[in-house]
Amino acid sequence: MMTFDEVADVLEDIIDGLPQELFEKLNGGVNLLPDIKTHTESSGHYPLFIMGEYHHHGMGLGRFINIYYGSFVRLFGYRQREHQISEIRRVLLHELTHHLESLAGVRDLEIQDAIDLEKYRETGLEMAAFKTDGNCYICGRTLGKTAMKNHLLREHSYGDEECLLLKIEGAHAKEYWLMVDIAKHMTLGDLDAFLRKIWLDCCGHLSKFKGGTKSRKLSAFAVGNKLAYEYDIGAATEFLITVVGETRRRPQDAVRLLARNLPPVFYCETCGAHATLICIECSYDHDNPCFCELCAKAHAHGEWLPITNSPRCGECCYDGELDTFAYSPPTLL
């Protein structure tokens, strides 16, 4: 994550590279502030962060733009530097458009912002939920789910073994997702064992597949088929598995992980820093039970779970101990 000073330098370089006519009558300039700012209608679970604001005050108080570094960190702190710079530029140009439209007596972008806010109100958590990109474990590309599927089918389908390409995601937490290939001769039992290792197992809970075909052989499934999967029956974490393509690979007796979501970023309830721990007791009655290691030491409660890149994060006693699939730059796949 870029520091405040680094973002300030990037912002200055972007401003210097733009036509200075865009800044005419912007007498208060462009200000980078350290604040985290959310909209007044922001959801507690999935905040609607304000990245930038254009201010136009009458009575000679001037016109100026504020960019909020804290909000920027919350939304894009985990992204690669190039993406962060792109977002800084996008926000600045958005606010400059408000400035130019204000000078011209036009409200087009203001109206579009109001439409976007109404969509947020109507769709609630679904609209505000994290949309995570993922890493291709073969070549390192960072892409969204649909783009990743197309990328894997186009760039990484070769070999003698016929496979199905599966998209696996949390049924109610779609920011967690995997793309795997599995040979058609393998079974749902093989897939269950893989999911337990990468995402699920803590106490050996029961699991089951629902829907699809009666056969447990992957050869019975076709592109477009979907099936549900539950782990910890009775207090289940639910998943959706979709066959999104047919692909090929070198023969191997394994479920192969091809892509995985970037870990969502959580923030400390006390100080706002990146969180690494979940307070088990707070998880029952607090909107945000997440804390950084420093604040956890001073917290009133003493039972903790690590934050993991799994839909089982914070559930039962899941600690991700068996998950050995953290992303590293492409090597042997």
Image: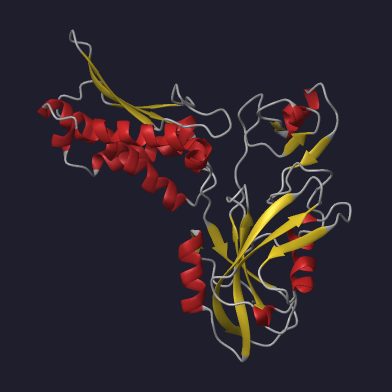
Compared with residue 101, is residue 77 higher up or lower down, i.e. above or below? below
* Viewer-proximal residue among 66 and 205: 205
Q: Residue at x 82, y 54 (%)?
A: 321
Q: How is the image coloured?
A: secondary structure
Q: Residue at x 78, y 61 (%)?
A: 208
Where's residue 214, x and y in %? 72, 74
Where's residue 228, x and y in %? 67, 60
Quarter of the image holding residue 284?
top right
* Viewer-proximal residue among 154 and 16: 154
Compared with residue 184, is residue 53 higher up or lower down, i.e. above or below? above
| Residue farthest to the left, as pictured | 104
| Residue farthest to the top, as pictured | 59
Q: Which quadrant is home to the C terminus? A: bottom right
* Viewer-proximal residue among 164 and 138: 164
Where's residue 68, x and y in %? 42, 29
| Residue farthest to the right, as pictured | 203
Q: Is residue 332 visible?
A: no
Please state if 150 lies on the left or on the right of 321 as rendered. Answer: left
Compared with residue 224, is residue 314 higher up or lower down, i.e. above or below? above
**Count of marks placed on residues:** 0
Q: Is residue 305 visible?
A: yes
Q: Residue at x 58, y 77 (%)?
A: 222
Where's residue 281, x and y in %? 81, 29
Quarter of the image holding residue 223?
bottom right
* Viewer-proximal residue among 234 and 104: 234
Please state if 18 lies on the left or on the right of 219 as rendered. Answer: left
Compared with residue 191, is residue 82 higher up or lower down, i.e. above or below? above
| Residue farthest to the bottom, as pictured | 160
